[in-house]
Image: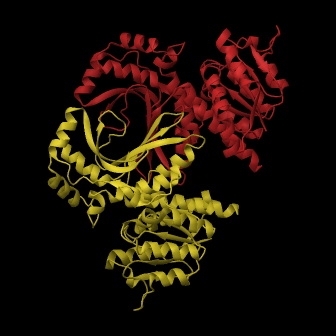
Chain colours: A red, B yellow
Amino acid sequence: MLRIILCGFGVVGQSFAKLLLSRSEDLYAKHGLKPRVVGVFDSVGSATSSAGIDLERLLETKKKYGNIRKYHNKERQANGLDMIKGMEAEVLIETTPSNYKDAEPGMSHIVTAMKKGMHVITVNKGPLALAFPSLMELAIYNQVQLKFSGTVGGGTPILDYAKNSLRGERIVSFQGILNGTTNYILTNMAAGMTFGEALDDARKKGYVEADESLDIDGFDAAAKLVILANWIMDMKVTIKDIKRTGIRNVTVSDIKRASSNHCAVKLIASCNRDLEVSPREVPKDDPLCVNGTLNAITFNSEHSGQQTIIGRGAGGMETASSILRDLLDIKQEMGRV
Amino acid sequence: MLRIILCGFGVVGQSFAKLLLSRSEDLYAKHGLKPRVVGVFDSVGSATSSAGIDLERLLETKKKYGNIRKYHNKERQANGLDMIKGMEAEVLIETTPSNYKDAEPGMSHIVTAMKKGMHVITVNKGPLALAFPSLMELAIYNQVQLKFSGTVGGGTPILDYAKNSLRGERIVSFQGILNGTTNYILTNMAAGMTFGEALDDARKKGYVEADESLDIDGFDAAAKLVILANWIMDMKVTIKDIKRTGIRNVTVSDIKRASSNHCAVKLIASCNRDLEVSPREVPKDDPLCVNGTLNAITFNSEHSGQQTIIGRGAGGMETASSILRDLLDIKQEMGRV
């Protein structure tokens, strides 16, 4: 049995709940996995049940009231940190929004859980961006697993590919389009919109984060670059080590000039000698040069040449599926001990 | 210790020998792997040494004489099958050329080795194309591992990605450009060459197999489709189940018509309801639409959308690196038993 505390019940949290509901039989039959969500909280409410929360009713409550306060018929709601400290569970899943100033509240959730001996799955990039090396040390010290497949590439298993599928191979460097929102904006600018028009359009489509600077100024891409550099290249870096330029100052004439060179302007995150996020010209026939909200990354390997992976970088269900992958890994590792 | 018999000493076999030489320290330090090649044979000669063949001298012999007969100073050379039957070794690596009529001599090498309890790594697609389901059964029956990473995608770990990186996800269908030679020809035709000119150019570059029908008529792509369908989709099929059309009848006007629809003609291998290899129009902005000798494959997954992997599909060193990956896997599995 695997008891789970879920932090955050936004798009990703709800998608994960739906995924558990729709796949419960198959997860048990194929993987022997019987997850039980014993606690869920978001910024305004919480639900707990050591016998397992009724996820269907929780989703209905969220849909009906916009939050989960009414799942229980009581006025006082458990505080998130108190829940982590007080409840018995094997795995914490952290899905609260990323922030790159102090990474709270995710940082406290993760640190508290690991110190208590819980495994952690995070799709919140903030804590990793600010403190990847020390969080990994903390995980090792407490003999718990810290998983984060969903932080880069959404449902596209970029981290797993680089770490596992390419085992026995050495990745020399890599470069990628890691933020779908800015790629969508740049694609629309190439089709004739100004930056302002393209940003408005992306906002209307719901592609832009509440704090739009996270996308536009390259914080999101930089956070993913931190995670890749630590995980794949064994670098010990944080977001402070990234040279970061966003797309705010990309002009229509920059894009036209690129186009006349058979190139497109893309926000590229690269790890070569330096770690850098900046708008750069990419040849249109380069596999990396994908359009719309797609993400893409090219690994330059020692013996197998360049390899590119392309996929949707975000989406609730995509990210939820990556959480499930992490959960299966944790279960497998636990079985080995 | 891992004793290896290597069948075939062409481009891939030599690349593998070079890779072992260049990485021997690292393989031992990082993976505890100490491979010892105890037998090598090709169609005209052989070398054996239970203490381990001097790969440097073997490569020099091959370079100097064009074959390995002179590695030993003796007239009679061991026959390949006799070597497999008579020598003690843990792993057979099969790199002789693919043929889709009877898959010999590779088929006999593989079957003989497995019946003897040896693990097998094959980059020869013939036996798998003709008899994947029964070879897999034979492997299970004899409790040996049958590995074939290098048969699809060369050094790009397409099979591993689909099977492992996407665990917990369901692949619904897939389509890909699995043959670099025909893609090179079609790319050149799109740039203005006729089929004949493009084929000549590909021949000059050394991209075309000795039996050019294997590329042009889609046998190579069909063989890879068989392997993918068996391995990823759990289908029990052989090359007879593939509906196959090559690129011989693709005309310049087909390509022009496609181009006016913002498409390119590509030899697509697809697994949907049917298994089919045929030239089809692909939108130019589809990530699958890669040029030159590149390979690409798009997996359509249930929850994570379309994911595309692009890489060089062939090359001696690329394929050799995939053999090494298989060898590391075999070692790991052996350790578990």
Q: Residue furthest bottom?
A: B75
The residue at the point 71 percent across, 39 percent down is A145
Residue A131's place in the image compared with B178, above or below, is above
Residue B61 rendering spot, x and y as whole percentages:
38, 78
- Inspect this view and state whether residue A242 appears: yes
Residue A293's place in the image compared with B186, above or below, is above
Q: Quadrant of the N terminus of chain A?
A: top right
The residue at the point 68 percent across, 9 percent down is A65
The residue at the point 81 percent across, 31 percent down is A116
Residue A246 rendering spot, x and y as whole percentages:
44, 20
Residue placed most toward the observer, B122 or B243: B243
Q: Kindly indicate the quadrant of the structure image that contains residue A59.
A: top right
Residue B105 appears left or right of A238 = left
- Inspect this view and state whether residue A270 appears: no
Residue A129 rendering spot, x and y as whole percentages:
59, 27
Residue placed most toward the observer, B333 or B50: B333
Q: Residue furthest top?
A: A75
The residue at the point 37 percent across, 21 percent down is A186
Q: Kindly indicate the quadrant of the structure image that contains residue A160.
A: top right
Residue placed most toward the observer, B170 or A270: B170
Residue B181 rendering spot, x and y as whole percentages:
29, 54
